[in-house]
Amino acid sequence: MLAVVLLLAGGTAGCGGRPTTHHKPGTGHQEAGGSTGTLLEAKDPAGHRYREVPAAGAPQVHLTVRPDTEDGWNLQLAVQNFRFTPDSTGGAALPGAGHAHLELDGRKLARLYGPWHHLPAAQVPQGTHTLTVRLYADDHTVWAVAGKPVQAAAELTAAAPGTAPGHTHGTPAPGSPAPAPPPGTPAPGSPAPAEADRTVTVSVRNGKVNPAPGRTELKRGERVALRVTSDRADTLHVHGYDKEIALPPGQEATLLLTADRTGLFEVETHESGLVLTQLVVR
């Protein structure tokens, strides 16, 4: 009986002991069962199915973009009939609960677990772009009303270096088509952000990580630049910090992180489940 109890307890724990399945290596996103809404055949660009709910009481989101005085922009998601539930991501779809995805011109930048997000200028090429936030249930299905995803969009203008970035306030734009993705993130060999105290450079090819995964020692408060090049489209994810950045195939992407909490944190590719390094913050 003791062995059975221990087995059941172990089977419910995800990364960091949380009840989640979305980080299980080698598996895709789950579409948990339940009676919340109706699953539609329509899917988002990443293949997540829509979950239709009635308009009355349905989740809503509004996006506001403001320039940050130091770097990039601060994004605010004003939601109604919705709450962010990072601790239950990967579980069943519950009414009015889940997380959001952030896209730039149709290219996923990050998964959001709260109403505020800082967008570094390094992630936005010069020019005018469309930011989109879309609401998802815990099982990674897309909340939808009348066959359209619950989302909001805002226009953002990245000025030339040395000038202040422009911005506009966003308005909900359910189902609005996204423009084609722009050229990606910084090219391989480009210098690391000047404000980074440490830089970790990793490449992923044919399912192998180079250099082999190890540990990166950091002092609390240090800033680390994670520079990753993958031969396939993926997402870079830092456990414990819930920081993500899209990895376009064949292009280097840089995630700048302030190590403001101590502990051991894994850095992995989200879709393929490969561990790239471990951050040890003391």
Image (tube, helix red, strand yellow):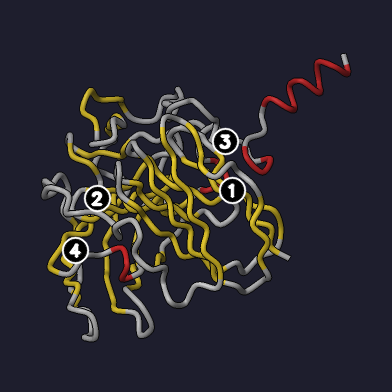
Spatial CA span between label 1 and label 2: 34 Å
- Secondary structure at numbered mark 1: strand
Check disc 1 and report the residue beneath it. 277
Query: x, y percentage for residue 45?
Result: 23, 36
Query: x, y percentage for residue 267?
Result: 55, 48
Q: Which mark is residue 121?
A: none
State the residue at coordinates (35%, 85%): 69
Amino acid type, label 1: Thr
Split into 4 quadrants, where in the image is the C terminus?
bottom right
**CB of mark 2 within 8 Å of CB of mark 4?**
no
Q: Which mark is residue 154?
A: 4
- How packed is label 2: few (under 14 Cα within 10 Å), some, or many (20 or more)? many
State the residue at coordinates (24%, 48%): 107
- How packed is label 3: few (under 14 Cα within 10 Å), some, or many (20 or more)? many
Query: Which one is in front in this view, the residue at disc 1 or the one at disc 2?
Result: 1
**Residue 93 versus residue 227: which sits nearer the camera?**
227
Query: x, y percentage for residue 185?
Result: 29, 57
- Secondary structure at numbered mark 4: strand
- Secondary structure at numbered mark 3: loop
Query: Which one is in front in this view, the residue at disc 3 or the one at disc 2?
Result: 3
Check disc 3 and report the residue beneath it. 20
- Secondary structure at numbered mark 2: strand
Name which of mark 3 and mark 2 comes first in the sequence.
Answer: 3
Name which of mark 4 and mark 1 comes first in the sequence.
Answer: 4
Spatial CA span between label 3 and label 1: 21 Å
State the residue at coordinates (39%, 30%): 36
Check disc 2 and report the residue beneath it. 151
Could you say which quadrant of the image residue 189 lies in?
A: bottom left
Amino acid type, label 3: Thr
